[in-house]
Amino acid sequence: MMIILANSEKKGNKCVAGKRLTINANNQYDRHEWIRPIHPQTDEGEIPTELTLLAGHSLAPLDVVSIDFDGSAENPDHPEDVNIKIGSPWKYHHQIEPQYLTYFCDQPITLWGAGQGGMERRVPEGFVRRMNPSFTLCLIQPQGHCRVDAFYEPGYQGASPKFRKRLHLNHNGSPHEFDITDTAFIGRHDLAEKARSGGFSMTLDNPAQTFLCLSLTPAFRGHHYKIAAAIFEP
C-alpha cells in the first residue's frame, strides 16, 4: 500500500508519488520509503489518467491505495521511481485525515543546491546521483511564510503567452523557487484568471499548518527543475 502525497498533471496524464505503508501488529500504519509509480511504456513514465479514477472519484492526496509494482526503474536521477505492473488495476482503500500529515514529514537539511548561487530553481543534470543520500521527493512544513507568484510570460516568436506559477520559500537560510504543478491549488485560488491582470502574488501565512510536497523533475535540457507537486493548506 501507499499514501498518495502528490497527484499532479504531466503531459496530459498524471504524476503520482507517496510513501509506502505497511500495517503493524497494533493495526496501525508504519511509513516507509518514497515511491513514484511510473508507467514503463509512456514517454516520461506518466500514469494514464484512467488508472487514477478509483471508487468513483479521481485519486487525490491523502488517499491510501494498493498498486502492484514490477520493480525499481533503476534510474539514478530519480531513485524513487518504480514501474507499475501493466494490466493490474489500482485499489482504493480510504483517505487519511490531514492532521496526520506531520507523521509523513521529512527533515531534509537542504533542498537541492542550498547555498549555491544559480540553483534556486534548478540543479544541473547529475546532481542527484552525487547526493548522499540521493532523493528527489520530500514532504516538509515551511520554516516561514511562502510567496506564490502567478503571471503570464510572453511567448517567443509569436507563440502564446505561458502561464507560470511559482512558489518561493527559504529553507535553512537558502532561497528556493518551485514551479507549482498542483492543479487543485491552482484552481482553488483561481491563479490563471488572477494572473491575467498583469500578475498576482499571495502569501501562505500559516506555515505551522502548511505542508509542501516538493520534487525534482527528470533531467530536461541539462537540468532538473524544482516543482511543488502538492500544497496542503489549513
Image (cartoon, rainbow, N blue to C red):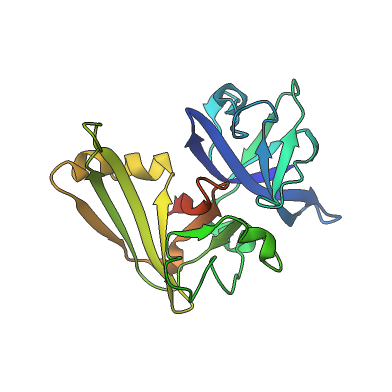
Quadrant in which residue 193 is drawn: top left
117 w.r.t. 220: above or below? below
Q: Foreground residue, 53 or 221?
A: 221
Which quadrant: the C terminus? bottom left
Q: Closest to the observer: 95 or 10?
A: 10
Pinpoint residue 126: horizontal percent, then vertical percent: 63, 57
Front-lying residue, 97 or 115? 115
Quick check: can you spot residue 190? no
At x 79%, y 49%, the residue is 22
Q: Where 231 falls versus 11 (above or below)?
A: below
Q: Residue 8: percent from the left, percent from the top?
A: 49, 39
Left or right of residue 224, residue 2 in this image:
right
Residue at (49%, 78%) from the top-left corner?
172
Name the outermost residue toward the bottom: 173
Residue 178, x across and y down, in percent = 42, 56
Q: Is residue 88 left or right of residue 170?
A: right
Q: Quadrant of the N terminus?
A: top right
Q: Is residue 140 visible?
A: yes
- The x, y position of residue 20, in whole percent, is 73, 49
Residue at 74% over, 24% down: 86
| Outermost residue, front side | 157
